[in-house]
Amino acid sequence: MTRIDIEIPKKILYTSKFTIEQEDINHAKHMGNERILIKANQIRTNFYAHLQLADVDWEKGEGTILANHAIKYVSEGFLGDTVECQVGVQALTECSFDLVFHFIKNNTKTLAIVRSGCVYFNYHEKRIKELPNSFIEAFQL
């Protein structure tokens, strides 16, 4: 099996915390693998709000879309574990970027690392579009 490696950004732009709840637990009595992606998507929304960025601007008909995800599971999460998620940006281009989510459980061990490839998109024209300056300035890489 080929293992993926996701580099953790040096610059963290946002941090969020949550506690693993019963709804996150699967039949094997640990956090379900799909829950990491659900949490990453919730945190992405909060990350954009924190930086005062619009995920989607319906007036202009444009916004970010997710092109891909990569997840590296490192350890198990259990009911009641406290998880901190650190968010950074990598691979910034004129029309795309990667968000990296580093999930750390109980302040000691990596739970998972998620990389989400984001592309700026015009919904009316159904095509990729250049990132607005607001994104580039907010990321300050």
Image: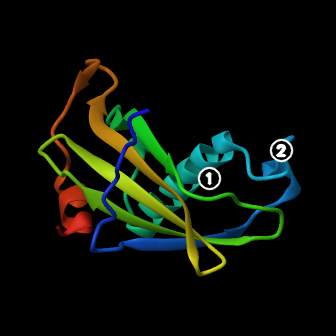
Q: Nearer the viewer, mark 2 or mark 1?
A: 2
Looking at the rendered structure, the secondary structure element under dot 1 is helix
Q: Report the disc number at residue 127.
A: none
Q: Residue at x 38, y 56 (%)?
A: 100
To which quarter of the image does residue 127 belong? top left
To which quarter of the image does residue 65 belong? top left
Amino acid marked by disc 2: Ala
Q: Residue furthest left?
A: 94
Looking at the rendered structure, the secondary structure element under dot 2 is loop
Which residue, given by chain and number where applicable, does mark 2 sit on? 28
**Residue 118 at what x, y percent from top left?**
33, 41
Q: Residue at x 78, y 62 (%)?
A: 78
**Residue 52 at what x, y percent from top left?**
39, 64
Residue 108 lies left or right of residue 14; in this view the side is right
Which residue, given by chain and number where applicable, does mark 1 sit on? 39
Q: Residue at x 29, y 66 (%)?
A: 9
Q: Are marks 2 and 1 in contact (CB under 8 Å)?
A: no
